[in-house]
Image (cartoon, rainbow, N blue to C red):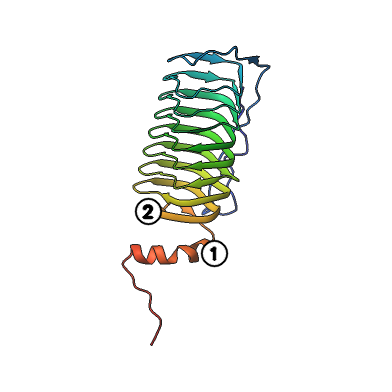
Amino acid sequence: MARSATSGGRSAGRGPAAVRAARRPEVRLPPLEPWDGGELEPDGDYDGLEFRDADFAGQDGAGARFMDCALTGCALDEVSMPRARLLDSVLTGVRGVGTDLAEATLRDVELHDARLGGTQLHGAVLERVLIRGGKIDYLNLRRSRLKDVVFEGCVLVEPDFGGARLERVAFVGCALKEADFSAATLTDVDLRGAAPLELARGVDRLSGAVVSPAQLLDLAPVLAAQLGMRVLAEE
């Protein structure tokens, strides 16, 4: 059963302008029963189970609920799990291309060392989620809601936050490459730990985010272009 960190409401720094820190999940799993195999079922109910090295490629788990579960080394290629609910669970070393988690709910979830590509999480709700390590290419989070989410030590290639709402989201030691924040709404989003910090679109939506002085200098050309400014050396 997950217990959220009690210190998450503290500011990451001092003073009224300090960014509020994201509350991290603290997932404590009960003793788990091994998954007995078989395929996922739409609207299936999975409680207190350990899925180890399972191959769910191409299966249909739409609307399924996972509670107090551990998924380790599982293949998620083209698995269809829209509107699924992942609660108080830990996913480690999962891999796959084209995983469909559109409109899913992830609450008190830890995702470690994932290797994913083209994961669909548009319209999803993520609350108290830790994504640590691994690499995720083309993550689709359009129109999703993220609250108390931490990306730590991972690589995100062309993530799409278009139209999403981000509140208390932190990027810690995380590579953020060609991110899209078009039409996104940011509140207490800490980008200081993103290196590199590369924005493809949506630099005008960074109100509510915090960057470091060095990052501000790196973003200067993009900000100038957004404002229609030309930067020329004196003749």
Amino acid type at circle 2 is Arg
Amino acid type at circle 1 is Ala
| Position of residue 211 measured from the top left corner of the image (x, y, whole percent) | 51, 57
| Position of residue 58 measured from the top left corner of the image (x, y, whole percent) | 45, 23
Q: Compared to 235, does 7 lie above or below?
A: above
**Crowding at label 2, few (<14), some or many (≥20) Cα neighbours within 10 Å?**
some
Q: Determine which quarter of the picture holds residue 230.
A: bottom left
Q: Quadrant location of the C terminus?
A: bottom left
Q: What residue is at 45 percent from the left and 30 percent from the top? A: 99
**Crowding at label 1, few (<14), some or many (≥20) Cα neighbours within 10 Å?**
few
Which residue bears the numbered disc 1? 214
Circle 2 or circle 1, nearest the eye:
2
Outermost residue toward the left in this view: 228
| Position of residue 40 measured from the top left corner of the image (x, y, whole percent) | 49, 16
Q: Compared to 146, does 3 lie above or below?
A: above
Q: What residue is at 39 percent from the left and 35 percent from the top? A: 122
